[in-house]
Amino acid sequence: MSTLGPRLAAAIAAKDPDTVRALVAPDVDFRGLTPGRSWEGTGAEALVEVLFGSWFEPSDEVRALLDVTVGAPVEDTERVSYRLSLRNGDGDFTAEQQAYYRTEGERISYLRVLCSGFRPHTSG
């Protein structure tokens, strides 16, 4: 089982574009789904732009990586889910992403991500 998924989750939580670029193939095939939009692109730069230009803006502080869960592969496709604690000018939020990915060598070459969106943090 690959460690690329958990490493990608940690890089996203750290808002670290250089590590994301290092973990994915230069021509990574990416698609994502957020509550209001679908996203797609080819290449590490397109992925980084979606992640840190749209999904997580500079004002979004990732306070913690709350959980990372690796699931059993579906044949050649691996799975990782991760949950983030976030804060921005609108308050405190939790977001979860589920990612399916395939690898070539030591890099992610195919990535599909489903995002819960930023959900307002509730006590209790």
Image (cartoon, helix red, strand yellow):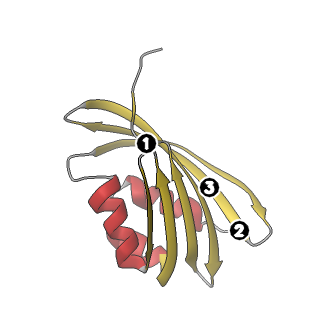
Residue on which disc 3 sits: 80
Q: How many C-alpha atoms fall within 10 Å of the one at disc 1: few (<14), some, or many (≥20)? A: some
Residue on which disc 1 sits: 117
Image coordinates for residue 121, horizontal then vertical, percent = 39, 26
Residue on which disc 2 sits: 77
User: Which amino acid lies under the numbered mark 1 shown in the image of this protein?
Assistant: Gly
Q: Is residue 68 left or right of residue 58?
A: right
* Residue displayed at 36% across by 61% down: 51
Residue 122 sits in quarter: top left
The numbered mark, 1 or 3, whose residue comes first in the sequence reads 3
Mark 1 and mark 3 in contact? Answer it, CB < 8 Å: no
Q: Is residue 113 above or below residue 94?
A: below
Image coordinates for residue 100, horizontal then vertical, percent = 62, 62
User: Which amino acid lies under the numbered mark 3 shown in the image of this protein?
Assistant: Val
Image coordinates for residue 70, horizontal then vertical, percent = 66, 53
Distance Cα–Cα, label 2 vs label 1: 24 Å
User: Which amino acid lies under the numbered mark 2 shown in the image of this protein?
Assistant: Thr
Q: The residue tagged with tag 2: helix, strand or loop?
A: strand
Of tags 2 and 1, the one toward the viewer is 1
